[in-house]
Amino acid sequence: MLALGIRCHSMAPLHGQTLTGPSAGIEGIFMTGGNDGGMAHVSEAAGHGGTWAATMISAAAFVFSGISFYMSALQRAELEVYVPPVLQYARDGGGDVDVFAIPITIANNGANTGAVLALELVVENVKEGAEPKSKTFYSAFMGEHPRDPAASNKTFAAIAIPGRGTFSDTVRFYPRGNPLPKIVQDAGEYRFTLRLVVAEPPAPGLVDRMLGTAAPAPITFTRTIPYISEQHLGFRRGTVIMHDKDWKPMSSAGK
């Protein structure tokens, strides 16, 4: 212990001498008064960097939570309608009334419930010089066209589609007003335009006003009827398939 004390004492510099060699390192360890300012600057910079990172992480979390809340609770109804490549043409009223039975799927990609009040169908005869050129049909009944004239019909009613939900059924369209003359008189191509009539919020919020209506854009598609049989359609109350020339479905999203 005495030797250690003497050795340590001998390491101390004499007056007017500069400590060099290994002793200088020990001197630097214990004589830190001159480096206090540098250490303080380093600590301050580290503190500012941590605060900035924490602020950015908190802001990002707030933004993501807001988006998640909007998508799960506030997002308006966003409806898309899909039709298959095939529909059924029939006749009612002893063969004097055109009827179109179209399987329809409506998907709600929004968070809020969407209400479809009615469906409107415009049918055009693309043949040059055809009369009438077009007629408008309304959504009258649900389900397939019955062969039995005494069968009960399920009247179309407004459809409520919950958020992220879907609706699928066959809708039968009947002509508005006078059914004569019929729009389908010969085999050939016919152009259809389907439009959904949806319920709008009575007092739309700011987001609803910015995003606009929840109704999908009308979809237009062409279907071909290969033949017309008055006996099959009028007396037997049968149906004839009308199909897309490429056998492809159609949607309001254009896919």
Image (cartoon, rainbow, N blue to C red):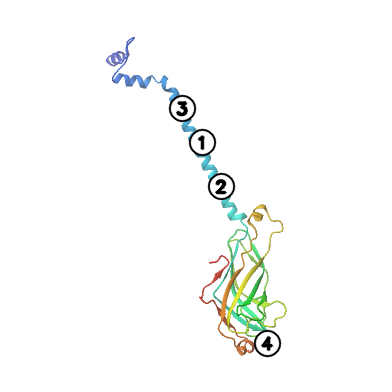
Amino acid type, label 1 = Thr
- Label 2: element kind: helix
Give the CA distance from mark 4 to mark 1. Answer: 81 Å
Task: Estimate how packed mark 1 is, as few (under 14), some (14 to 19) or many (20 or more) residues with alpha carbons within 10 Å.
Answer: few
Q: Which mark is residue 51?
A: 1
* Percent position of residue 176, x then y: 70, 76
The single residue placed furthest to the left in the displayed view is 3
Sequence-wise first label, 3 or 4: 3
Disc count in the image? 4
Give the CA distance from mark 2 to mark 4. Answer: 63 Å
Sequence-wise first label, 1 or 2: 1
Sequence-wise first label, 4 or 1: 1
Residue 53 appears in the picture as rendered? yes
Provide the residue designation for mark 4.
94
Provide the residue designation for mark 3.
41
Provide the residue designation for mark 2.
63
Give the CA distance from mark 1 to mark 2. Answer: 18 Å
Sequence-wise first label, 3 or 1: 3
Give the CA distance from mark 3 to mark 4. Answer: 96 Å
Sequence-wise first label, 2 or 4: 2
Pick the residue in front: 57 or 249.
Answer: 249
- Circles 2 and 4: CB atoms closer than 8 Å: no
- Label 1: element kind: helix
